[in-house]
Image: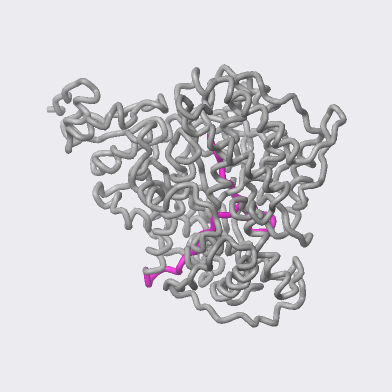
Amino acid sequence: MAGQEQQQPQPRDTEVEEEVPAPPAPAEGQASASTQGVDDLLDEIDGVLESNAEEFVRAFVQKGGQ
Amino acid sequence: MRVMGSETEYGIHAPSAPGANATMMSARVVQAYAQVTRLRAAGGAETRWDYTDEEPLHDARGWTLERGQAHPSQLTDQPPVLDAEAVALAYGREELELDGEDESGSLLMNMVLGNGARLYVDHAHPEYSSPEVTNPADAVAWDAAGDLVALAAVRRLAGDPELPPVNLYKNNTDNKAVSYGSHENYLMPRSVPFNDIVRGLTPFFVTRQIICGSGRVGIGQDSSRPGYQISQRADFFEAEVGLETTIRRPIINTRDEPHATADKYRRLHVIIGDANLSQASNYLKFGTTAMVLSLIEAGLAPKIEVHEPIAALQTVSHDTSLTATIRLVDGRRVTALDLQWIYHEAAAKLAQDTGVADAVDGDGHTHAVLDQWATTLSQLDSDRPAAAASVEWLAKLSILEGYRQRDGLQWGDARLGLVDLQWADIRPEKGLYYRLLSRDRMQRIVKDADIAAAVTEPPSDTRAYFRGRCVSSFSKDVVGASWDSVIFDVPGYGRLQRVPTREPLRGTKALTGALFARHREAGPFLAELLGSTPAPPPA
């Protein structure tokens, strides 16, 4: 694991079961809108990612399967 | 096109209860869905799985593995009994005691659903096995319906103050050396020699991942090398052909368990695929594979042999540039795209010759699959941003690259690992695939309404229709079911009535819909179906 996980500038997102309202979808189709769309998308994803990345990923341990 | 179906084992995680027993949690998922649907409440007992015709040790190469030689996880023909002893044996007593509120020792492990699917606990994961369908669009719809089934169970558990919330992930690895499967099943005539299947499919399976891989952060089974690769599963394959599914996983699996008339059919059990959220990737996974099987049946599969297929599989997976070449036994070097085009060309020619792709007289699906396949291969070659709207590994990669550029993250950064994991969270507000879908950045193959309908409705054109309608119409009288049987316990009949359903294309709506419409009670329904009057009850 890389050793720089202490910096966690993401917004808190607690594990409550409520709909996170999605920002309105950007207009599709134009190349110039596409970059803007990626930035919007990353902002949205920042808001839904679990809060402590390193701990969350480490705790996801599965038993074997098929 | 062909009878087919999917199986999805979900990754399961309760963040608030680390160390919770996975088998127990999986049973709670099944239990929760039973509560949601009340399918169990009506009968006072679950619809039990009928294990009579399960033959997990039959090998398609013509022999049967002795039970004593088998890995315990291969014995899937016995009902799992989740009693204290079994859990302790499997996972150690400490875990049991952490969790041990199950005094009865009989949590629900199995359900047959009204849509014809099976929801059950497979080892340490909840698994949804779709009903049998006849084309890849329906395969997408009933596979995605499974994600809604899983979601309903997750919501139910989240609303239960007594139990920890459970997250389910439609992925295939925990990135810590463990993998769990997403399987496909295809019905084939038994007359096709198994060696032809191995020869025809292996080069296709080595390269199919470029159109339907789900993408994975990390290289190697334990992700010890930083990076990104095309397939979730590729690094977990260690054999070319074999019976196992949990150890020494083979590219071609030989489990010969037809769940149908055994001298006519084989069920090809495919274990190499990734679980797909992307509808387009899932559609191509089923559609192209079904077409390659038609090539093999016709004796027209491309005459290609890959040198060292396991290594080639991993070479392809590790090369997101799609420029790496793999060596063929005849000495040629080709890219994965080259190989896919060779298969596409052969499939297109066969479809033209047989007329199945004809706009008017065709089967209504082959033409669309061929088009989507060609479009995807062209885009992978020359328009990757366009391909990212359909190909799952590229869609995921576009988010990861966005993070890498914006925040300067290295591949080993935990946040990229989290993006990979959370891509597959089945909750639409948390799952990153669903965030893209809601912005119309992912191609839809089937309408949302059709997926929602497939949660409760069986496909109309296979025996799954009969199974599903029996479960939903006569819930209290159906005591067991399997792929090839439905078992009734009806007052008036002296003993259980087992209705075999060994022909996958019978029991359809066309054949049995009117029968279901005529009867609201199981007794008269069975009497008409079996052409008999009930035996008098014992005196």
Query: Percent position (x, y) of residue B5?
Result: 49, 38
Vertical relation: B376 (above or below) B481: below
Vertical relation: B41 (above or below) B264: below
Left or right for B174, reference B105 = right
In the picture, the quarter occupied by the N terminus of chain A is: bottom right
Left or right for B210, reference A28 = right
Q: In terms of image quadrants, where is residue B174? A: bottom right
Vertical relation: B50 (above or below) A7: above
Considering every residue shown, the one lying at the far right of the view is B331
Magenta region, residue range: B160-185
Q: Inspect the magenta stretch and tell me whether residue B101 lies in it.
A: no
Query: Percent position (x, y) of residue B428?
Result: 47, 63
Query: Percent position (x, y) of residue B425?
Result: 53, 62
- What residue do we see at 20% from left, 35% from top? B517
Colour scheme of the picture: one colour
Considering every residue shown, the one lying at the far left of the view is B539
In this view of the protein, which residue sits in the foreground, B5 or B256? B5
In this view of the protein, which residue sits in the foreground, B392 or B236? B392
- What residue do we see at 17% from left, 25% from top? B534
In the picture, the quarter occupied by the C terminus of chain A is: top right
Q: Inspect the magenta stretch and tell me whether residue B184 lies in it.
A: yes
Query: Percent position (x, y) of residue B258?
Result: 50, 28
In this view of the protein, which residue sits in the foreground, B254 or B71? B254
